[in-house]
Image (spheres, rainbow, N blue to C red):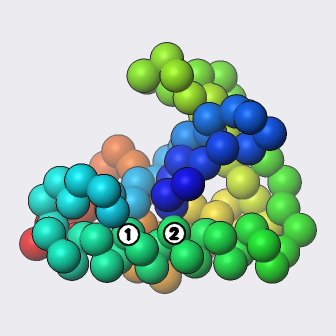
């Protein structure tokens, strides 16, 4: 699991409408990106482990390998929570602030 992709019941899920930094590839931000990715993953795990949540699926992503979904806590998308906490960006139009 990272902050926008996880396995749920044996299904590879890509959470939609937001993007998070990459901890394994640090595409553009080096150690800043890795640190932010680690924080975002820990926050998502805390949200999912500490709250009741619901998942809604929307088909398959552009790779053809992952199911698109949203996860909500009390009606709030976890992506919106991570974005508000500066751990993620809106996708596809958000700024990759961890690259700067």
Label 2 – label 1 distance at C-alpha: 6 Å
x and y, in percent, of residue 63 in the image:
42, 22
Any mark on residue 68, and which?
none
Instruction: Name the residue carrying label 2.
Output: 41
Q: Is the C terminus in the top left, top right, bottom left or bottom right quadrant?
A: bottom left
Image quadrant of residue 57?
top right
Asked whether residue 82 appears in the rendered view, the answer is no
| 86 left or right, relative to 72 | left
Task: Give the vertical position of 4 relative to 13 (above or below).
Answer: below
Which residue sits at x=51%, y=60%?
A: 3
Task: Give the vertical position of 99 relative to 39 (above or below).
Answer: above
Which residue sits at x=55%, y=41%?
A: 14
Q: Are marks 2 and 1 in contact (CB under 8 Å)?
A: yes
Spot the residue most to the right.
52
| 12 left or right, relative to 31 | right
Q: Residues within 10 Å of mark 2 (few under 14, many from 20)?
A: many
Image quadrant of residue 29?
bottom left
x and y, in percent, of residue 79 in the image:
56, 61
Q: Residues within 10 Å of mark 1 (few under 14, many from 20)?
A: many
Q: Secondary structure at mark 1?
A: helix
Q: Is the N terminus in the top left, top right, bottom left or bottom right quadrant?
A: bottom right
Which residue sits at x=58%, y=22%?
A: 60
Instruction: Name the residue carrying label 1.
Output: 37
Q: Secondary structure at mark 2?
A: helix
Looking at the picture, tell me which residue is in the foreground, 15 or 91.
Answer: 15
């Amino acid at each position: 699991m990272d902050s926008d992709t996880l396995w749920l019941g044996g299904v590879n899920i890509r959470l939609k409408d937001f993007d998070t930094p990459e901890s394994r590839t640090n595409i553009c931000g080096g150690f800043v990106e890795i640190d932010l990715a680690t924080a975002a993953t820990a926050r998502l795990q805390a949200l999912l482990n500490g709250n009741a949540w619901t998942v809604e699926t929307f088909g398959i992503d552009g790779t053809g390998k992952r199911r698109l979904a949203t996860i909500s806590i009390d009606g709030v998308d976890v992506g919106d929570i991570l974005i508000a906490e500066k751990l993620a960006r809106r996708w596809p139009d958000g700024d990759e602030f961890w690259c700067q």
